[in-house]
Amino acid sequence: MYPSRIVCLTEEPTEVLYAIGEEDRIVGISGFTVRPPRARKEKPKVSAFTSAKIGEILKLEPDLVIGFSDIQADIARDLIKAGIEVWISNHRSVAGILGYIRRLAGMVGRADAGEALALRAQAHIDAISAAAAALPRRPCVYFEEWDDSLISGIRWVGELIRIAGGDDAFPELTDNSLARDRIIADRQEVVRRAPDLILGSWCGKRFRPETVAARPGWDAIPAVRNGELHEIKSPIILQPGPAALFDGLDALHARIAACARR
């Protein structure tokens, strides 16, 4: 018996289930869900990222709750204590996203649809990689996930930057899954690494290029001198789901390719 009443505590399971035509199984979603847009209109919102309405979830009588990462461990514990089956994924890489799509689809009896979606994503990755190989140069890219303290991009973001044709300015930090382990304590280190392109995705608030450019000493950075400071919308890059492999990768490649051709 496959689960028929699923609560999704983050956006990526919702996106995958809609993409494979299994949205009717979803009975509750995260309040941060924006993809697909219709999900917000069709499904009750019962969680944030670090908190959830446990009572409301139980009223939905789910036979599976899906979450993401150790950050949701407390939510998972409370649901498990209440007798609910919970699956918490913890993938942080491009390969992990592809594997996640396949596993989730298999859990609802749609392994074929999951494989098709994963193959389509891989084909898109391969196409962008081929286009990136034709660029005249590989810009150095500083990706900023948060502005206070400065937090650099997580692993799948760093991998997608490389696929899109750039080189991550802080490759030694990308494998750190927790944001606190990707803090850049010395802001002048960004200056020293001289990125050609600065991309910002401040989760939950608008990226402000003018604020970044005004940081002391940052006028020496090539990206600042050339006006190469741009926002990548967080829903398409900071969720480890299909959006990152399609729209997120496209947005990265568009900015990197434009910078490379300057």
Image: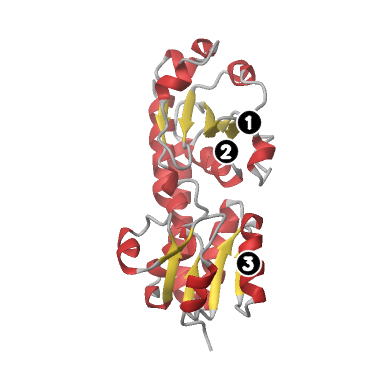
Q: Secondary structure at mark 3?
A: helix
The x, y position of residue 157, in whole percent, is 54, 43
Q: CA distance from mark 3 to mark 2?
A: 26 Å
Q: Tag 2: residue type?
A: Gly
Provide the residue designation for mark 1: 170
Quarter of the figure with the C terminus = top left
Q: Which mark is residue 153?
A: 2
Q: Secondary structure at mark 1?
A: loop
Residue ID at (58%, 16%): 191
Contact? badges 1 and 2 (CB < 8 Å): yes
Label 1 CA crowd tier, 10 Å (few <14, some 14–19, many 20+):
many
Judge from the rendering whether residue 159 lies leftward or rightward of residue 129; answer left or right.
right
Label 2 CA crowd tier, 10 Å (few <14, some 14–19, many 20+):
many
Q: CA distance from mark 1 to mark 2?
A: 8 Å
Whichever of callouts 3 and 2 sits on the residue coming sooner in the sequence is 3
Label 3 CA crowd tier, 10 Å (few <14, some 14–19, many 20+):
many
220 in relation to 55, above or below: above
59 in relation to 67, above or below: below
Judge from the rendering whether residue 119 lies leftward or rightward of residue 180; answer left or right.
left
99 and 74: which one is in front?
Answer: 74
183 and 157: which one is in front?
Answer: 183
Q: Secondary structure at mark 2?
A: loop
Residue 99 in view (yes/no): no
Whichever of callouts 3 and 1 sits on the residue coming sooner in the sequence is 3
Provide the residue designation for mark 3: 76
Judge from the rendering whether residue 175 lies leftward or rightward of residue 49; answer left or right.
right
